[in-house]
Image (cartoon, grey):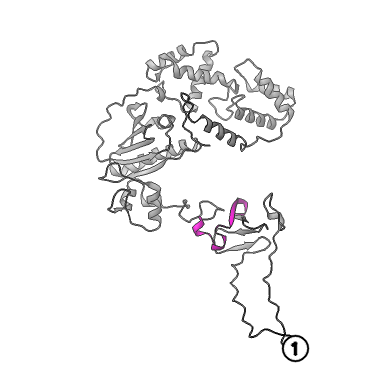
Amino acid sequence: MDIIETSCANNVGLDAVRDSLRQSLGTLPHVRDELPTSFFAVKEHLEKLDADYLPFTAYEELCRDKGVDTSASQELLIGFLHDLGTVLCFRTDRRLRDTNILNPSWVTGGVYRLLNSHAAAQEKGLLRWPVIDGILDDDRYQPDKRQFIVEMMKKFELCYESDDIFLIPDLLTKEEPDTGAWEDTLDFTVRYGVLPSSIIGRLVVRLHPMISQGTVWRTGVVLRLDGNRALVKADREDATLVIRVAGPANGRRGLLTAIRAELRKIEKTIPGLAGEEQVPVAGHPGVWVPYKHLLNLESVGRDTVVPQGLVEEFPIARLLDGIETKADRRPTRGTPGSGLPTAAGELPEAAERPEDTKGRFRFLGLPKFGGIIALSASSSRCSARWSAISPSVAMNVNATRPTTPPRRRPPPRPVPRRAEAGSGLRRRTPRRPPQRAVAGAFCAPGWDSGA
């Protein structure tokens, strides 16, 4: 998925969105799966229902009437219907399992009614049950189902509950309150290509037990943990999240680590979103060094770095020690560019691959063997071989045990003079290197094992 900037006011980016959708839809799983016609009968029946929700037991009865008899088929079908948006079903969530099947517009209508209501805006995002009951005072939202709407907002990190008050970050005041002095702090920045407005709100929801004295506003929050305080602010125009941690030096890393961990979890839920973590250079406001770059330099034994725009060197360890201890940042698995395997069955980066495979193979993951199949892309004949994680060990497809790479043959000895008819010398026939057989069963689909 791509993150594309759009504007409905002047139609900027809409063509790019259409193109991205066309390319993505064809790659979705199950798009071309063949399904029983009984599945479509259930889907069409549910689409015609006027009810906003119905119990799962009623869904099971409908499935049996349409010929979807087994529990496994019913669970499979409800998963497909949920993915399509025909219905919403949260069977594994204890807060939502009692209302299993419902009309999606019924849920979104209730959520947007709370988010867009004048009463909620007047309360600056701090809602109590009397206000919620007044906003959802409608026959469609009976009192026993209003809790469900609020639980849906909590599930999707649109609000959180504290002391019987529901706080909606998107409705908080825009003005930043007085957060106190922030001197001698551990600073950290995460920079994005585009910063979604939901990032800071979801971070506030996830970390709300750590909010310091209720200090939270629409684009920022102050957190507290073990005597340390952290100021987290989002800058939409600069597409950055700025984190400043104050307090005892030995506790700052813990609070920063907690914030970074939740931020990574949020990023994983938004396809295509990846922030670049940056470390400031002390004494040089506005000068930052990418955190991963510092880790890579340290991993290859470098002690200093010259930040962009400066000429003096700075100790890498001093820049990194405030973020993580050396023991914490020691890689247990490889990182891109480190030359170490990043997971079982993966090869190092190209710089660490055997020389005879550089640029001539494309690699397909094969976790069950703990290695990879390498298919030649430069020859009309499909050649395949298995390579272990260690570049010094290779094995033929048809071999029964690993062997070391063959030694290079010495050049043939020169013949003193060419044999001629009647000379009494025997004409030598040059020996050809043996051709290795390749099993066609190991070729990828669409590759021909013949010439």
Quarter of the image for residue 176 reads top left
Highlighted magenta segment, given as a residue range: 348-369
Residue 155 against residue 182 in the figure, above or below:
above
Q: Position of residue 114 (x, y in %)?
A: 46, 18
Q: Is residue 392 left or right of residue 250?
A: right
Q: Residue at horizontal 68%, vertical 55%?
A: 442
Q: Position of residue 438 (x, y in %)?
A: 69, 60
Q: Residue at horizontal 41%, vertical 14%?
A: 118
Q: Is residue 191 left or right of residue 341?
A: left
For the C terminus, which image quadrant? bottom right
Q: Residue at horizontal 64%, vertical 83%?
A: 415
Residue 350 in magenta stretch: yes
Q: Residue at horizontal 45%, vertical 19%?
A: 115
Q: Is residue 327 left or right of residue 314?
A: right
Q: Position of residue 356 (x, y in %)?
A: 56, 63
Q: Please name whichever residue, 307 or 217, is drawn nearer the observer in this view of the structure.
A: 307
Quarter of the image for residue 441 reads bottom right
Q: Position of residue 394 (x, y in %)?
A: 60, 63
Residue 382 in magenta stretch: no
Instruction: Find disc 1 in the rendering and name its residue.
Output: 422
Q: In terms of secondary structure, where does tag 1 sit?
A: loop
Residue 257 against residue 329 in the figure, above or below:
above
Residue 285 against residue 117 in the figure, above or below:
below
Q: Which residue occupies the extreme front position in the image?
A: 421
Query: Amino acid type of disc 1?
Result: Gly
